[in-house]
Amino acid sequence: MNYLVGAFKPPCNIFISFTDGRSRKQVPLKKENGKTVMVALFQSQENIVGEVVVIEPIHGKKVEHNGVKIELLGQIELYFDRGNFYDFTSLVRELDVPGELYERKTYPFEFSTVEMPYESYNGVNVRLRYILKVTISRNYVSNIVEYQDFVVRNYTPPPSINNSIKMEVGIEDCLHIEFEYSKSKYHLKDVIIGKIYFLLVRIKLKNMELEIRRRESTGSGPNTYVETETLAKFELMDGAPVRGESIPIRLFLSPYELTPTYRNINNKFSVKYYLNLVLVDEEDRRYFKQQEITMYRNLEAS
Amino acid sequence: MLNGTEDEEKWLAEGIAGIQHNAFYMHRALDSNNLREALKYSAQMLSELRTSKLSPHKYYELYMRAFDELKRLELFFKDDSKHGVSVVDLYELVQHAGNILPRLYLLCTVGSIYIKSKEAPAKEVLKDLVEMCRGVQHPIRGLFLRSYLAQISRDKLPDIGSEYEGDADTVMDAVDFVLQNFTEMNKLWVRMQHQGPGGVREKREKERSELQDLVGKNLHVLSQIEGVDLEMYKETVLPRVLEQVVNCKDDLAQYYLMDCIIQVFPDEYHLQTLETLLGACPQLQPTVDVKTVLSRLMDRLSNYAASSADVLPEFLQVEAFSKLSNAIGKVIEAQLDMPAVGAITLYVSLLTFTLRVHPDRLDHVDQVLGACVKKLSNIPKLEDSRAMKQVVALLSAPLEKYNDIVTALTLSNYPRVMDHLDIGTNKLMAMVIIQSIMKNNSCISTADKVEVLFELIKGLIKDIDGADVDELDEEDFKEEQNSVARLIHMLYNDEPEEMLKIICIVRKHTMVGGPKRLPFTVSSLVFSALRLLRQLQGQEGDIVGEEASMTPNKNFQLLTQIIESLSAVPSPELALRLYLQCAEAANGCDIEHVAYEFFTQAFVLYEEEIADSKAQVTAIHLIIGTLQRMNVFGVENRDTLTHKATGYSARLLKKADQCRAVYACSHLFWVDDQDGIKDGERVLLCLKRALRIANAAQQMANVARGSGGPVSLFVEILNKYIYFFEKGNKQITSSAIQGLIELINTEMQSDSTNPDSVADAFLASTLRYIQFQKQKGGVMGEKFESIKL
C-alpha cells in the first residue's frame, strides 16, 4: 500500500523561500485556477536570494537523482498559443551534483542583479510571469519540479516632459468642445485633472463620462489580436450644458487596477491606455473622442 | 393630466422607497463603523436623486428625505474614531463614486467637515466644491445640489469674526463663493425655461417660480455676511449680482432677483448705490415688470426716509430723486412697449417718494408731472381705464400730501396732466380737487391761481368737444355744478382790485359753460360780486379816488353783463331775482340810475320772458318787495316804477292774484321809515282798487259756481286797512273799516252754502285783534274805539 501511495505522490516536497521573505513586500497574484495568492515583489536588478528546502523522502526512502537545479524564468504566454511559453529570461543555478537524497536538505541560492526588464502582467490574451523553478532530475522517472511565482514591478522616474493634452473637436454646426487633460503621462495613483469647454451645443446632451480603456494587442502581423477593456466609467456631467460652460474633470486613478503602458514587450504584446471622452445625447447616441495616455509606475506613489 | 400626476406620485413613492431601502443598509453600515459599505449605500441612496421624472415640487420632497439621511452620514464622517480615515483621505475617497450626483453630494458633505476640521483653509474647500458642482448641468438637479452646498456652507463661510476667517481678504473669498454659487444657480434656473421636457409655458414658469427661493437664498446669505459692508457691497457684490441679472436675459429671473436685491439688502446700501441699481433697470428685458420693481424700491426708500429724520441728509447727498427720476425716464425710453399704465404707475411711485422724502421740493413734484405729460403726449389717446386710475392717483397724491390746492396750483404741469384724462375722469378729478378745497377750507386768493384752478376744472365748467351729452346723469351734473358754485364762494381776496380780477376770470370761464351750467354758476358769481361791492362800500371812505378802476359803477356794469348772459338761458326767474338783488345793492351804494336800470331790466324780463302765471305772481311780489325797500329813487323814477308795478299787478291772470298784488302795492306808497314816503291817498286808492277786484272776484265766483267766492280776500284787505290805520294813515278811517267788517259779515252770511273755515278763523282772529286794541286803551285804544263790532 505504502508503495502505491508513494507512486502517486512526489517522492519528496520542495519549498522555495526568499531570505528577505518576511520583510519583502507581498502583492496579490491571480493564479490560473482563479485563486489569488500573495507573492513576493521584486524589481529589476535586484538580487534574488533564498533557499530551497527539500524535505526528506517519506519512510526514509532514498531518492536517486541526476542533480538539483534552480532556474529563474521570465515567460510570456500567449493564450491563443496556450501551453507554449516563451522564455525571455532563463538563469540556472546548479544546487547539487547527482546523488541520493535521503534526508532533509537545504540549498541556498542566489541570482545577483537579475535583469528583469519586463513587469509581470496578467492580461486577457497574454500573461507575463516570473517563476523560480526547482528541478530534481531523475532517470527513468519523471523529474520532481516545484515552482514559485514572484512579481516584478519596475519603477520609472517621473517623465521630464509631460505635456498636457488639449484638443478641440466637434461635429460641424452641432457640437464643438475643447478639452484639456493636464498631463499626457500619469502614474498609477495619479489624478486626472482637466476640463471640458463647450463652444457650441446644438445637441440635447444627457450626460458625459470619461472612460479609461486598456488596449492589449498580442501577436504580430496577421496574427495580431487586439482586446479592449473599459476599466473605468466615470460620469463627468449630468444634464445638458449650454455654450460657454466648462466642466471640471477630476478622476482619481487609484481605485482602478491599472498597469504601466507596455510597448512591444519582447515583440509579443503591447498594453496601452486611453482616455475616452463620451458624450451621450437624449436619444442615447454616443459621441466620443479617444486619447492615448501613458501610464507609468512611480516609486513614490506606490 | 390626471395620469401625469398619478404617475408622478408613483415615481415619487418609488424614489422614497429607494432612499429608505438604501438608508436602511447605510444605517447598518454606520452602526458597524463600516466606511466602505456606508459609502456604497449612501451613493446608491443618493442615486435616487438622479431622476428626471419629478416636478420641482415632488423632487423637493425626495431631496428633503435624502437631506435628512445625509445629516446622519455627516455625523459619522465627523467622528474619525469610527472609520479611522483622515478627512483629507475621506475627501478623496468619496470622489471615487462613478456617478456624479451622488459623488458631489458626498463631496459637499465631507467638504463641510473638512472645513470644520480646519485642515485646509475654508476658502480652498469652498472654491473646490463650487467648481466641482459645475458637473451637474441639469437644472433641477443642479439647483438642488447647489442649494445643498449653500445650506451646508452657510455657517462655515470665512466671514469676519467667523472661526473660519483666514489671513487676508477672507471676506472676499466668502463673497466670491456665494456669488459664484448664485451665478451658477441662476444660470441653471434660467435654463429651465429653454430646456426640460417640452411642456406648456405656464407650467414651466410655475415650476420655475417654485424654485426661485433656492436662487434667492444666496442673496440672503450675502446680506447676512458680516463682512459685506457698504464699500464691498458697492464695489463687488452689487455689480456682480447685477451683471448676472442683466446678462441672464430672462424676465422671470430678472424680476424676481431685482425684487430680491431690494428686499434683502439694507436701505442705506440702496441709497448709496442707487445709480448702479437703477442703471440696471433699463437693461432688463422689456417684459420685466420694472415698474413694480422700481415702485418697491421707492416704497422702501420712502419708508426709510420716513423712519427717521436723520437719514434725510443722505437722500439729499446722493441726489436720490434725480437719480430715480432719470432711471425712470430711461426705463420708459428703453421699453417702448410698456403700456401707459406702467409708465404712469412709475411716476406715481416717484411722486410718492418725493412727497415723502422732499415734501418741500415742489419743483420735484412738478418735474414728475412734467415727465408724465411728456410720456402721455406720445400716446394718442389714453383709453386704458387702469392707466386712467393711475393718473388720478398721480394727481391726487399732491393734494393729499399738502392738503392744500394752493400748492398744487403752483405746479405748472398739473393742468397739462389733466388734459390727458378722458372726459369722465377729468370731471372726477375736478371734483376731487373741489372737494379737497372744501374739506380744507382753502381760500384761493390770487387771480393767477384762480386762472389755473379753472383751467384744471374746466371739465366741469364747459362742454368738452366730443363729450356725449346724453349720457350725463342729471343728478351727477347737478352735484357737479353745485360744487362749482360752492367753489366760487371759496375764491376770496381782501384786496378789491385782486378780487375784481378773480371775478373777471371766473366770469370769463363760466360764461362759456353753456345754458345748462349758467343757472348754477351765475348766481354764485353775482353774489360774489355783490360781496365785493359791500366790501368796497366798507372801505369807501379810505381809498376813495385812489383806484379809479374800482368804482362801484364799473362793478355794476360787470354785474349787468353777467346777468345778461343768462338771457341765453331760459331761466328768466333767476335773472329777475339777480337783477333785483343788484338793484338793492345799487340802492345800498346810492346810485340811482344803476338801480333804476336794474329795475328796468327786471321789468323787461317780467314783461317779455315770464309767461307762467304763477311765476308772474312770484315775480311781481318780489318786485314789489324790493321796490318797497328802495330809497335811492327820486320822485319821478319812483313814480314810474311803482306805477309799472301796480299796473302789472292789476294785470295778473287771476282776480285773487290781482287783488293780492294790488294791496301789496299799497306798501309802495307807505314806507314805515322815518323819512319814508307816506302817501296815504294812494294807499287808499290801492286798497280800494283791491276791494273792487275782490268784489269782482266774488261776483265772478258767484256767476261761475252759484256760490260765494273767497271771502278771505276781504279779510286780507281788512288786515291791510287795519295796518295802515294803525300806522296813522289819515285816509284810512274807522268808518271805512267798520264798513268793510259789515261787508264781510254780509258776505259770510250770504254764502253760507260754502262755509270757509279758514276765512272764518281768519276773520275771527282779526276781529279779536280789533277787540284787543280797543281794550288796550291809550292812543291806540282811542283810535279803535270808534269801530263798532
Image (cartoon, coloured by chain):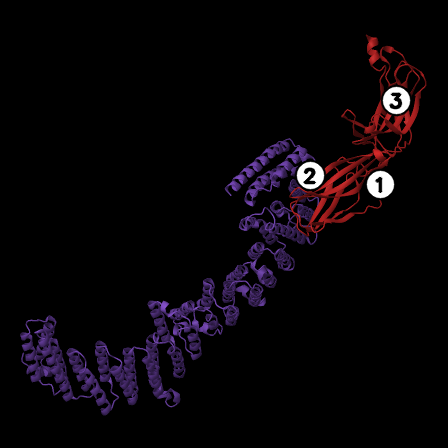
Q: Which residue is mark 3?
A: A134
Determine if residue B331 is in view. yes
Distance from Cα at disc 3 to Cα at disc 2:
46 Å
Compared across the picture, whether B341 is left or right of B751 comes to right
Which residue is most to the front? A222
Give the structural element (helix, strand or loop) at label 3. strand
Mark 3 / mark 1, whichever is N-terminal: 3
The chain letter corresponding to red is: A
- Say above or below: B298 vs B694: above
- Front-most of residues B172 and B106: B106
Give the amino acid at mark 1. Answer: Pro
Residue B382 is situated, as x and y percent measured from the top left of the image, at: 47, 66
Residue position marked by numbered label 1 in the rendering? A157
* Residue A114, horizontal then vertical, whole percent: 90, 31
Would you place residue B173 above or below residue B369 in this image?
A: above
Q: Quadrant of residue B538?
A: bottom left
Q: Which residue is mark 2?
A: B98
Which one is closest to the eye, mark 2 or mark 1? 2
In percent of width and height, residue B284 lies at: 59, 59
Q: Nearer the viewer, mark 3 or mark 1?
A: 3
